[in-house]
């Protein structure tokens, strides 16, 4: 599910016939409802919900972040979790349980300057994760957060606030003990583990996927 349906379709095509691509804006109540309905129609009860869609304001001094930018970041990074949990937790409850993963960030654990309101949105995602874990435990719904360190996705240049040159990347890589940026497959592997029955006793954690950045 993505606001960019073409991108979602490319990912779904890579996964194969079992995947369904849905276009939706996670900040829109109607879109959230429609995406949940489309998923339920195709697959039945959702066992796993991954709140991954995210955005940021560009890295800059906090007084330069506009109210519109603040609202956009919190709408996509925080309110989306509120909306999807409300739509899906009752369905999981009726089915006997489920797993929710929120893609937070090392920004929630070890913030970088210039990203204050993005950092705050991920702090909200991480704390919501812990509180949801407590409140949804009686329904056998586990809730965990993944905290990736910087990775070379569409957001990288906004996080750095400077052009994506090898020299600028080096400055950020120098802050990551294992000496590289995160890759999507690092986060996917951690998500697969947390969503699996191997993690059946793990709930309410922030799992850094960060090459040691927050150690
Ligand atoms: N890249 C990093 O350095 C990094 C580090 C830590 C955490 N994260 C988090 O990882 C998650 C995935 O980001 P990414 O790095 O893969 O960046 P990305 O830009 O490649 O992916 C984010 C996706 O969210 C989608 N999206 C944005 N607004 C949306 C909306 N309103 N409704 C639906 N979809 C929307 C975008 O179209 C995009 O496909 C985000 O939550 C991000 O905050 C990223």
Image (spheres, rainbow, N blue to C red):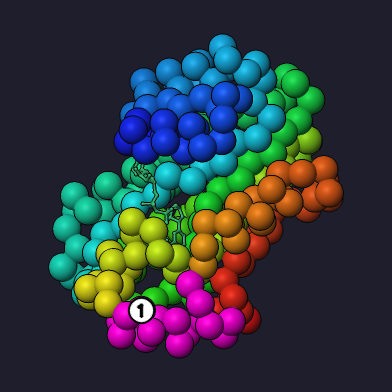
Is residue 53 shown above or below 164? above
Quarter holding the N terminus is top left
Residue 113, by quadrant, is bottom left
Is residue 208 shown above or below 213? above
Residue 129 position in % (x across, y down)? 60, 50
Residue at (69, 48) in percent of width and height: 192
- Horizontally, residue 44 falls left or right of residue 68, namely right
Residue 104 position in % (x across, y down)? 51, 57
Q: Is residue 193 magenta?
A: no
Residue 26 position in % (x across, y down)? 39, 35
Q: Which residue is mark 1?
A: 169
Residue at (34, 65) in percent of width and height: 156
* Residue 119 visible in the current orientation: yes
- Horizontally, residue 45 falls left or right of residue 157, namely right
Is residue 11 shown above or below 215? above
* Residue 131 visible in the current orientation: no
Q: Residues within 10 Å of mark 1 (few under 14, many from 20)?
A: some
Q: Is residue 176 magenta?
A: yes
From the viewer's side, name the closer residue of 134 and 143: 143
Q: What is the number of callouts on the image?
A: 1
**Is disc 1 placed on a helix, strand or loop?**
helix
Residue at (75, 40) in percent of width and height: 137
Residue at (61, 67) in percent of width and height: 208
Residue 142 position in % (x across, y down)? 72, 43
Is residue 129 shown above or below 119? above
Q: What is the span of residues highlighted in magenta in the rendered image?
A: 166-181
- Horizontally, residue 7 falls left or right of residue 19, namely left
């Amino acid at each position: 599910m993505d606001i960019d349906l073409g991108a979602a379709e490319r990912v779904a095509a890579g996964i194969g016939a079992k995947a369904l691509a849905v276009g939706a804006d996670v900040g829109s109540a109607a879109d959230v409802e429609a995406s949940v309905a489309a998923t339920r129609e195709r697959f039945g009860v959702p066992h796993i919900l991954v709140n991954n869609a995210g955005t940021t304001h560009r890295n800059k001094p906090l007084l330069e972040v506009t109210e519109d930018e603040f609202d956009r970041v919190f709408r996509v990074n925080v309110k989306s979790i509120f909306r999807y949990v409300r739509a899906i937790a009752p369905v999981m409850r009726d089915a006997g349980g489920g797993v929710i993963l929120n893609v937070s960030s090392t920004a929630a654990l070890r913030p970088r300057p210039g990203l204050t309101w993005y950092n705050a949105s991920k702090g909200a995602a991480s704390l919501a994760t812990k509180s949801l874990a407590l409140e949804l435990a009686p329904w056998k719904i586990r809730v965990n957060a993944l905290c990736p360190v910087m990775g070379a996705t569409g957001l990288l240049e906004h996080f750095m606030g400077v052009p994506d040159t090898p020299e600028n990347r080096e400055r950020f890589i120098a802050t990551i003990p294992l000496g590289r940026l995160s890759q999507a497959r690092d986060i996917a592997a951690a998500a697969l583990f947390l969503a699996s029955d191997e993690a059946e006793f793990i709930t309410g954690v922030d799992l850094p996927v960060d090459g040691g950045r927050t150690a």
